[in-house]
Image (cartoon, helix red, strand yellow):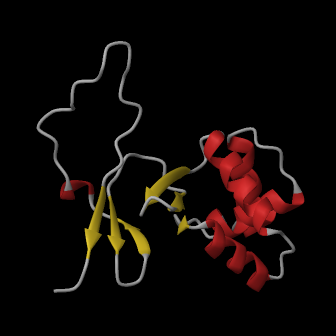
Amino acid sequence: MAATATEIGRKWLQSADVRPTKQRIALAELLVGDGQNRHVTAESLYAAASNHGDSVSLATVYNTLRAFCDSGLMQEIAVEGHTSYFDTRMDEHPHYYWESSGALTDAPKSAIAFAREPDTPAGTKISRIDVVIRLDKD
């Protein structure tokens, strides 16, 4: 028998030792319950939760997304300086930002190739490289 969205969400939270509150489980179900990766904003996840009948506030969604990022379950991708997307896919990969719709999607890893990583200031190291390729219609 296949695992339910709730079971998948709970296992996802357990994998990072995140306390499984009712709200976290509900949001985890929406994020990973079908086994697909997601790019969401806090607002889009809040709307999805509301449409699904889950009672969570926008502040709870923001706090939960932050907890998921802090625990290593998600990564935050900043676009436009004021909009953040939250990605459930944790490997390093580039993104397409579709300016006409405001959507963020995965780009193939082959879309970007670095000749070498940039030098860093003394006492620092690169923790992650985020690449966002902005797309617009001709």
Q: At which x and y percent is residue 13?
A: 73, 49
Q: At which x and y percent is residue 11?
A: 72, 51
Q: Left or right: 77 with respect to 137?
A: right
Quarter location, residue 40: bottom right
* Residue in view at x 11 percent, y 38 percent: 115
Can I make out residue 1 in this image? no
| Observer-nearest of 93 and 15 | 93
* Residue in view at x 28 percent, y 68 percent: 134
Q: At which x and y percent is residue 93?
A: 34, 52
* Residue 27 versus residue 54 in the image, above or below: above
Q: Left or right: 79 with respect to 138?
A: right
* Quarter of the image where the N terminus is located: bottom right
Q: Left or right: 76 with respect to 69?
A: left
Can I make out residue 39 in this image? yes
Q: Left or right: 27 with respect to 113?
A: right
* Residue 66 versus residue 111 in the image, above or below: above
Residue farthest along the front direction in this orientation: 81
Quarter location, residue 25: bottom right
Quarter location, residue 110: bottom left
| Observer-nearest of 115 and 31 | 115
* Residue 16 versus residue 29 in the image, above or below: above
Q: At which x and y percent is residue 111?
A: 20, 58
* Residue in view at x 71 percent, y 73 percent: 46
* Quarter of the image where the C terminus is located: bottom left
